[in-house]
Amino acid sequence: MSFPAFFLLFPLIIIPIIIHLLSRKKLKKIDFPSLLFIIKNEIRFIRWFQLKRLLLLITRISLLIFLILAVVNLKVPFSFFNPAKTLILDNSPSMEKIEINDKNAFIVPMHSGIPQFFSYLKKHSPGILITDAQKNGFTEILKEREKFPGIRIKKTAFPQGNLAIVGAESGPAYQGKKFNINFNILNKYKEKRKTRSTLKLDGKVFMEKNRILKVGESDLSFNLSLPRGLHQLSLELEDKKGFNFDNKYYLTVNVRAKQNIYILSDDYPERLIAALPPSYYEVKWVRGTSEIKGNLFIANNVDKKSGLSLLKNPISGIICLRGAENTSISNKIPDRISTVVEKSSLNNSSDLKALSQIPISYNCIITDGKTLMYFENGNPFVSKIKNHLILPTSLEENDLSLHPVFIPFLFNLINSLSEEPFCSNILLDEPIVITNFLKPTIISPKGNEYAGDPVNADNYIFKETKECGIYKITDGNKIIGLIAINNHPSESKLESLSDEELRYIFGRSGLTNGASFFLTLALLCFILSIFIERRT
């Protein structure tokens, strides 16, 4: 509660006044026929009775005022039963050069390298917060307009500047083809900065570059051609005056073999062929199921007879049902239009949130297999039966094929059937969901092994991702995947709370929370009022 609330609660002071007036006792005047045997009352007794009433009124009003001041967290210029010696440490990456020897210091929890101040300060006692006041950790506090006047701030300084790698993107990587890796570099110094960048591949120095970085953001690109398989990369910038946690970035790349894809369709599949570039795929159009060969097939708008025969094909494929009649795995329904939910259990799935914005038409419901994606209305959108994916809509004629998300969606469908190793890039503390029929384990950069928790059949979740670097996934015999984990990029941008924002959240320096002081005064007033009231 803020101090202005004091003025809203101030009218409550009238309560003890009303009680006082209602409980007033009047002295009765009694006529006696004779005063011979009556001792004359002293005037001081009458004065004490009047003083007692006044003191009770003052103590009751004071009790209420002190309780109000304690509730509104009014600050005082001194410490009174205040655990200000308690140390609270911001342990975010940008605080890496700060050493605290006090073993009893409380550590603020983090997520993706961002301290969670709001949830911590709401639950814990006040103290001295040692922080560099990076703005990203206080965003929720400012949004909720919360205040913590009991916290005293010991603010540490930022370095003069910082060189940081805040992101990276890799194009599709295929065996025998060059692909591009682009790193996003941030120069937070006030002038151009010369640096040496070192790109490592699978633990060995692969390439070095000298570069003058402009102030602000710039890109650093590498063209690579790598053999098939999983590869771990890292880029490091030379920066002796800035931070050390964000001048190194980790990335995993899965280099795939070129695939032969057969498209089964009555008409020429113009959109599908355009979505599968010849640099990565050998695509062939066929009209009969007997002509299907290669690594994978896509069957567009198949009928009942063809669909059943395709399910028996040992080649992995994507089967798009027409819905002209009921089959053993689907039922025909009237035409429907729906969007797709964001969540997907497709292995190696990238960001497909745009699917939730596209109306998709279909006229059958899939009744068999394991559902990987759903429509908003609950009907299956993508189901899996053995080594085949089943969709209740066309990949050629539907409006989905005209949307930018169509190509990454199609790539995800193909990759989920290609038995490719798991490869992902996430942020600190984010969970990992791995699909594998054997119970996998992950090995952290420091060599610690963690077992996953089963979610459902063949799916395991891993939550121990608290350090940056490359994590290895193993099935007990071989490496089946790699995961690159980095800090949140906002931690590198050196955006600090302003003095006004610090004063808004924690109040002015030199003042402490007076709740304990005012509660103590309220208790003394309560005891004093009881003593006065019982005094004869």
Image (cartoon, helix red, strand yellow):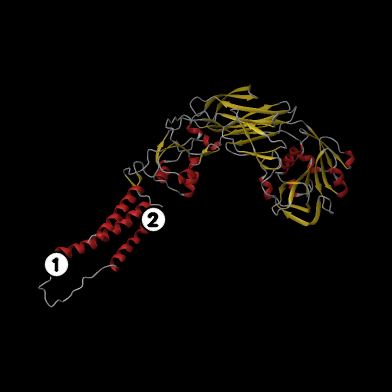
Residue that appears at 73% across and 41% down: 407
Nearest the camera: 437 or 317?
437
* Above or below, 287 relative to 189: below
- Residue 355 is situated, as x and y percent measured from the top left of the image, at 69, 47
- Helix or strand or loop: what does disc 1 sit on? loop
Nearest the camera: 247 or 323?
323
Q: Which residue is mark 2?
A: 5
Image disc number at residue 184: none
Residue that appears at 24% across and 63% down: 53
* Above or below, 340 relative to 232: below
* Above or below, 336 relative to 353: below
Farthest residue toward the front? 37
Mark before the other along the chain sequence, 2 or 1: 2
Farthest residue toward the left? 36
Residue that appears at 33% across and 63% down: 15
| Residue kind at label 2, given as amino acid type | Ala
- Helix or strand or loop: what does disc 2 sit on? helix
| Residue kind at label 1, given as amino acid type | Asn
Badge nearest the viewer, 2 or 1: 1
Is residue 275 toward the left or the right of residue 74 in the image?
right
Residue 163 visible: yes
Q: Quadrant of the C terminus?
A: bottom left
Image disc number at residue 41: 1
Residue 266 visible: no
* Mark 2, other Cα within 10 Å: few <14 / some 14–19 / many ≥20: few
- Residue 451 is situated, as x and y percent measured from the top left of the image, at 64, 35
